[in-house]
Image (cartoon, grey):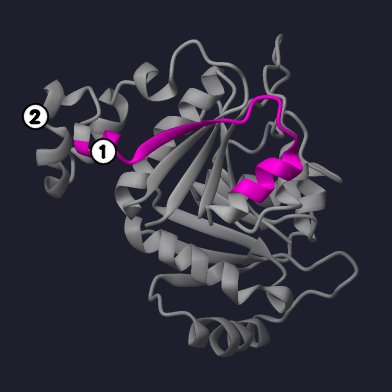
Amino acid sequence: MKSILVINDNSVEAENAYKLALLIAHQVEAEILVANICKANTLMPEKIKMAEVNELLVGHHEFENDFGQEAGGHDLPDRFMRSINEVDFSGIKEKYIAQEINRKNIWLIIQGMNTSLPNVNLTNINISCLLNKVKCPVLLVPANWKLKHFERIVYLSDLRYCRIEIVRYLARFAKFFNADISIMHLSARGLPHMEQEYALKLFSDEVCNNINYDRLYLNNTKERDVTKAVHVMIDALQNDLLAVVNHRFHFKEIFGRYINKTLPEHITVPLLVFPY
């Protein structure tokens, strides 16, 4: 069974991330491990009611028996609760947390993020440091993002350096949501644009032929400004999940050298960051 680790710092951002973890865990049949990095007064599973997640699940008839009538449609059913556990990571350095994540073969890490500097920052974990040491991706969830099913996923990359293992991961993830995947090609700094005919051939030969997913598309843009490209991906093309690779190409143009305590303001949807 897949395992999802949610970083909990007792913040509202962490609660938002936890709701998304519940939704993903139910879709992919994964267990959840809540990593408390601060001493918690109330356990995360007891703080969160299922009302918001339930609204999404009951729209699909196969979920109605699980979340529609049981416990009044608000609380997590016992069957699902048994797949949720907590661990105390408070005061533990990132390298030891990463060792435990790798030992447990965690499939996905989820971290709630603010888009502006909070008055009090409870988070005492360096997400960039963690990303440098783990083998699985980290999903950064903006605090103001409204919980929803994923419909369109975009991987921002230079097609010439597109990593097949990342597209395979995205395809497996997207299949659970019946979502589209697009690779948005932005030429890496210093490299020329790709002509459309060549880009389509490369996409077909090197990507599609190696990925068993029929909802996979290419967007070959000549835009050089990553901020403008992100606006297009989110606002115009309505992608609801962005994927990038840690320390590579467009990651640096979005974050700089490393992920800070907050997400850039133009990142308004969850951002999936893969280890380099």
Which numbered marker is on residue 69? 2
Which numbered marker is on residue 80? 1
Q: Is residue 161 visible?
A: yes
Identify the residue at horizontal 76%, vertical 56% (top origin). Answer: 250
Residue 116: give x, y in percent of width and height.
70, 21
- Between 47 and 199, the one lying in front of the other is 47
Q: Amino acid at mark 2?
A: Gln
Residue 214, placed above or below residue 19: below
Q: Which structural element holds mark 1?
A: helix
- Label 2 Cα crowd, 10 Å radius (few <14 / some 14-19 / many 20+): few
- Between 129 and 179, the one lying in front of the other is 129
Judge whether residue 82 is colored magenta.
yes
Q: Nearer the viewer, mark 2 or mark 1?
A: 1
Q: Which residues are magenta?
A: 79-100
Task: Judge from the rendering whether residue 265 lies leftward or rightward of residue 42; answer left or right.
Answer: right
Residue 45, placed above or below residue 147: above
Which numbered marker is on residue 166? none
Identify the residue at horizontal 23%, vertical 23% (top origin). Answer: 75
Task: Judge from the rendering whether residue 251 lies leftward or rightward of residue 205; answer left or right.
Answer: right
- Between 249 and 185, the one lying in front of the other is 249
Cα distance between the residues tagged 2 and 1: 14 Å
Residue 40, placed above or below residue 267: above
